[in-house]
Image (spheres, helix red, strand yellow):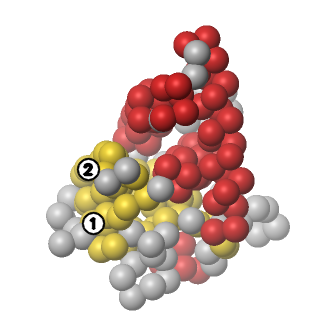
């Protein structure tokens, strides 16, 4: 049975060239997994169409304006979830990364008017939880930001090791 997903933090680890997803970091029910470039990019590539197809706002919008409506919805979601953001200490993230296992499966599906996110590692262990549309969009925005820092989007160079004075990873 997977752990209940309460929070997630993403951090790029240059030495591994992977993203560590720390679930419930620092808690008794903590779990972490590695997201490879292939998995992270595939997830981000599929999500815009998925979100468009599941958005009541986009369905009601005129065809020519759907992109603007979904962008508005995304920005509103980011603003709505801002207060839930917190900083995860580097020590906890380092501990999470050292215990991480390679992700085997990530799924996001509509569930009871919201969404269900499930992540499982190769051992069969994992985390799952229900998310509102706003929470899902926040998590995807966080993943996108880390993918961009890693240089996986093609335009930026790979990220260097994090500096102590730089921005700290956040979790939702």
Q: Residues within 10 Å of mark 2 (few under 14, many from 20)?
A: some
Q: Quadrant of the N terminus?
A: bottom left
Image coordinates of residue 134 in percent, x first then y, are 55, 52
Q: Residue furthest bottom?
A: 28
Residue drawn at 31 percent across, 66 percent down = 127
Q: Residue at x 82, y 67 (%)?
A: 165
Coordinates of residue 148 in the picture (x, y in percent):
62, 40
Label ID, residue 105: 2
* Residue in the foreground of this view, choosing between 140 and 38: 140
Residue at 66% across / 72% down in the picture?
Answer: 86
Mark 1 Cα shell of 10 Å, populated few (<14), some (14-19), many (≥20): many
Q: Which residue is mark 1?
A: 126
> What kind of element bears circle 1?
strand
CB atoms of marks 2 and 1 within 8 Å: yes
- The disc placed on residue 137 is none
Q: Nearer the viewer, residue 163 or 59?
A: 59
Can the viewer see residue 127? yes
Question: Looking at the rendering, in which quadrant would you find the C terminus?
Answer: bottom right
Percent of width and height locating residue 2: 24, 70
Q: Is residue 37 above or below residue 23?
A: above
Nearer the observer, 40 or 50: 50
Give the answer, above or below, for where 17 lies relative to 88: above
Q: SS class of the residue under badge 2?
A: strand
**Looking at the image, is mark 2 or mark 1 earlier in the sequence?**
2
Q: Is residue 154 above or below residue 131?
A: above
Camera-nearest residue between 118 and 94: 118
Q: Is residue 106 left or right of residue 40?
A: left
The residue drawn where x is 24% and y is 52% is: 104
């Amino acid at each position: 049975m997977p752990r209940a997903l309460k929070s997630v933090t993403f951090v790029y680890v240059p030495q591994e060239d992977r993203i560590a997803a720390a679930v419930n970091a620092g808690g008794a029910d903590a779990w972490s997994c590695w997201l490879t470039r292939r998995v992270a990019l595939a997830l981000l590539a599929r999500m815009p169409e998925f979100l468009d197809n599941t958005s009541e706002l986009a369905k009601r919008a005129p065809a020519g304006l759907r992109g603007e409506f979904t962008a508005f919805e995304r920005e509103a979601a980011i603003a709505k979830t801002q207060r839930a953001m917190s900083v995860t200490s580097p020590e906890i993230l380092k501990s999470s990364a050292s215990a991480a296992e390679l992700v085997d499966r990530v799924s996001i599906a509509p569930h009871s008017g919201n969404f269900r996110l499930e992540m499982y590692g190769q051992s069969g262990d994992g985390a799952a939880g229900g998310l509102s549309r706003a929470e899902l969009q926040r998590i995807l925005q966080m993943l996108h930001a880390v993918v961009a820092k890693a240089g996986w989007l093609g335009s930026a160079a790979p990220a260097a090791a994090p500096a102590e004075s730089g921005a700290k990873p956040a979790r939702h």
